[in-house]
Image (spheres, rainbow, N blue to C red):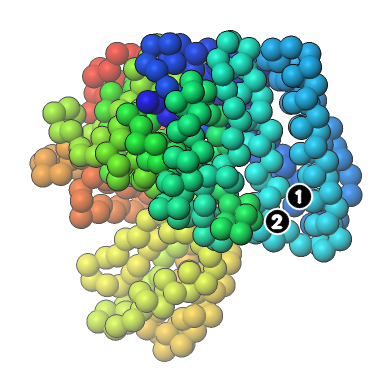
Amino acid sequence: MIVMKFGGTSVGDVTAISNAAEIVYQTVNERGPVAVVVSAMSGVTNALIEAASGAARRDAGVSLATRDHLLEKHRTAVIGVASDVGRGIEILRQVEGFLDDFVNLCHSIAVLGELTPRGLDVVSSLGERMAVKIVAEALVKRGLKAEAIDATEIIITDDQFGNASPLMDVTRAKIRERLLPLLKQGVVPVVTGFIGATRQGVITTLGRGGSDYSAAIVGRGLDCEELWIYTDVDGVMTADPRVVADAHTLPTISYSEAAELSYFGAKVLHPKTVLPAIEGGIPVRILNSFNPKHPGTLLTEKAVNDGPAVKGIASIGNLSIVTVEGRGMLGVPGIAAKVFTGVARTGSSLFMISQSSSEQNICFVIQQQSTAKVLRVLHEELELELTRRVIDRITAQEGVGIVAVVGAGMKGTPGISAKVFGSLGRTRINVIAIAQGSSEYNISLVVDADDIQNAVRAIHSEFELGRRGSGSVSAG
């Protein structure tokens, strides 16, 4: 049995939904039973969240305008995939019901003047709950038996709204109880991604990569043979093809390597989202629903070191590097603790940390939009140290980015750093800061934002990553 997940762009319009349905149809005929997990149509969840946020600001018209826009988007899809007029009318009635609920929710949010995490989860769930009806109908039109399943029936979570975790024992039992009888009857279950519910039935969402997480949970619950994640790219690539013309798809990549790449902005699954599949020993493959003949990328538990030392290069911009420095820091315990406690108070994420061996400065990278807040809090947190001149200054350089060079084969391989920095030196790119983890899977470099793309191209060329692939380039 295969569990197939289709992301937002893979069900983004009539053509995409019909294409996804054809892939499912072919797989059922060739491989046997299939369970499907779907995301909301592309752009829908963002529109819902923006409207709910507007309602919290008491913007009365945004929810009605969003309702009309989303109704038209889903109506077009329903008309395009409905197997007959009667079924199409029934699905449209259900879609209208969800959107009416959305307007009512926004009215309540506006009255309260507050959008709570619990309320946001209810609003955010509506996109998947509409999409699943349409995708199931597209399968019926192709002659398959299919049933739309709301994941609130089968994925039971804790109550951490916005980033809920599944209660796997009860969830596995629910999945098997609800889905196995359908699969035995030749029915394709089409399950909402991204969402679940508490034991009390309150809707939750699973956070970043939630639909991928849902698919892995379903796959683990069903003990599936493989998990196929369909996106709009041909798998994991050596670099962003919009930046590097000869970037190509990697046939395999380990979960650890994928974690490094995804953290720095590459279009890769984060291992957390497929953790249930990893724990169950279920192979995960990333595929392109718009190019279904491409073999994609297979995610493996252990790194395969029979290829190039460097697997891929990722980058992320719109960052700032903050530096805390002072000659009095040498040998003074607790400075780093106070620095990072202060940053934690702002709710900011750290993308990279570096410290000189002399202990005279600590630098770290944050989102640029958080710069002013972080600087203010650090001056408050370290007021005593600044007064006593233990710390001389706290500064920030905005407009920087990180380039991450990733590959399990880098571990223990001499000369990797020399090639990285040599390529940047020849391109006359200045490196502001450097960090490398003890795993040696990743070298991270801070460069000026204007140099990010040239740095990626230079390193990609230096390691001849473009010559190692088939030359295929994704439009992603």
Q: Splitting the image into 4 quarters, where does residue 111 fall? A: bottom right
Give left or right: position of 318 versus 115: left
Query: In terms of depth relative to the viewer, which is nearer, 127 or 138?
Result: 138
Q: Residue at x 57, y 57 (%)?
A: 198
Q: Position of residue 211 (x, y in %)?
A: 51, 39
Query: In terms of depth relative to the viewer, which is nearer, 252 or 75?
Result: 75
Secondary structure type for disc 2 = helix
Q: Relative to 20, does residue 302 appear above or below in the rendering?
A: below
Q: Can you identify the residue that label 1 sits on?
A: 52
Q: Can you identify the residue that label 2 sits on?
A: 119
Q: CA distance from mark 2 to mark 1?
A: 9 Å
Q: Splitting the image into 4 quarters, where does residue 413 fall? A: top left
Q: Splitting the image into 4 quarters, where does residue 420 fall? A: top left
Q: Position of residue 446 (x, y in %)?
A: 38, 49
Q: Relative to 360, does residue 474 appear above or below in the rendering?
A: above
Residue type at tag 1: Ala
Secondary structure type for disc 1 = helix
Is the Cβ of the residue at disc 2 closer than 8 Å to that at disc 1? yes
Comes first in the chain, label 2 or label 1? 1
